[in-house]
Image: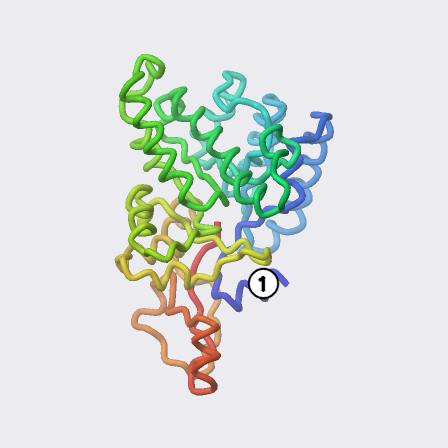
Amino acid sequence: MTLEWMDAMGVDYSCLFPTPMLFLGLHPQVEVEVAMCRAYNAWLCERVLAVEPRIISMLYLPFNDPDAAYKTVKDFGDKKGVVGFMVTSPRYKPVHDNAYVKTYALLEEMGKPIAFHAAYNWNDQSLALTNRFISVHALGFMWFNMVHMTNWVINGLPERFPKLKVMWIESGLTWAYCLMQRLDHSYMMRTSDCPSLKRKPSEYMREMYYSSQPMEKPRDRSILEATFKMINAETQLMWSSDYPHWDFDLPSVVYDLPFLSEAGRRNILGGTAAKVFGLDPKPVKKIPDAGCPRPADPGRVFHRRAVRENERDRAGSAQCPAIPTRTAQP
């Protein structure tokens, strides 16, 4: 089924991560997190990644046990289809703890990115005050990544590991825009609290990578354009579908943005992911176009014009059913 929806959306590569493991970092027994992590990573590498080249993964990192996290990178970092490692954000371990330095150094040496995947914890003391799922979902998916990002930057980890690629996944985009301004404002008045920084916090944040989903869509499009500008979206943003969740995004959410350059669209819809994950940028599967005309240079582009479902429905049978977007999904 994974390949079927990938073909339907025109996705060449899919970077998989299982939803239930987003909350494993909250398990009260650290040894359980470590055991489940190793079991899942081994199964995924042996049964899926080894046999299906279009499926890749950033493997789960058992972050509550720093030694186990290091061993996970050592044991699985060179496996086929492993393009990086994932820290699930709902947890209460400071990312700047020196116990993680050897893991960050190893990832930097191997050229593998580390990602922080957002989620929520309804039992968190602050989030427990919310009484609707929409509330804890909206806040939680930003909150934990905001805490980890702040600790990562303010404690100088970008200076200690300048070549380590860092990604922030599924928090949307507005959180980064607002946090950049807030940290810069505080930094300019209390630089003594950040002796290891040589630049403003926002400058480090603009060099990190972000997934697009769920991409906020303000009615005033200039707000979204400013957000894209703040995070250097044309080189640092990666389209993500989050399919089949209720808030998943089609490639058209990026393709249809009028303020993007053509090069920026190609990067966001796959070019940046190809660079970060070390993927072949050429499409890996030819999808029949049902007689619809193709855009120029189809073999070299990551994306093709996306036809929104609602536009297709309005146009009826005269409209092309789809010209899929070619992309790699982070």
Q: Is residue 232 left or right of residue 10?
A: left
Q: Nearer the viewer, residue 167 or 212?
A: 212
Residue 155 in picture, x, y percent from top left: 41, 19
Q: Which residue shows up at 54% across the image and 42% down it?
A: 58
Query: Across the whole image, how many numbered discs are drawn on residues?
Result: 1
Direction bottom: furthest residue? 318
- Where is residue 289, by image quadrant? bottom left
Residue 256 in picture, x, y percent from top left: 35, 64
Q: Residues within 10 Å of mark 1 (few under 14, many from 20)?
A: some
Display coloring:
rainbow
Residue 140 lies, with reference to residue 106, above or below; the image says: below
Q: Which residue shows up at 57% across the image and 49% down it?
A: 16
Q: Which residue shows up at 34% across the image and 23% down it?
A: 159
Residue 235 lies, with reference to residue 30, above or below; the image says: below
Q: Is residue 213 left or right of residue 299?
A: right
Residue type for callout 1: Leu
Residue 83 lies, with reference to residue 328, above or below; the image says: above
Q: Nearer the viewer, residue 310 or 324?
A: 310
| Residue hosting label 1 | 3
Q: Nearer the viewer, residue 180 or 22?
A: 180
Task: Check the picture and name the quadrant holding the N terminus.
Answer: bottom right
Q: Which residue shows up at 34% across the image and 63% down it?
A: 300
- Dot 1 lies on which element? helix
Residue 195 in picture, x, y percent from top left: 33, 14
Residue 61 in picture, x, y percent from top left: 59, 33
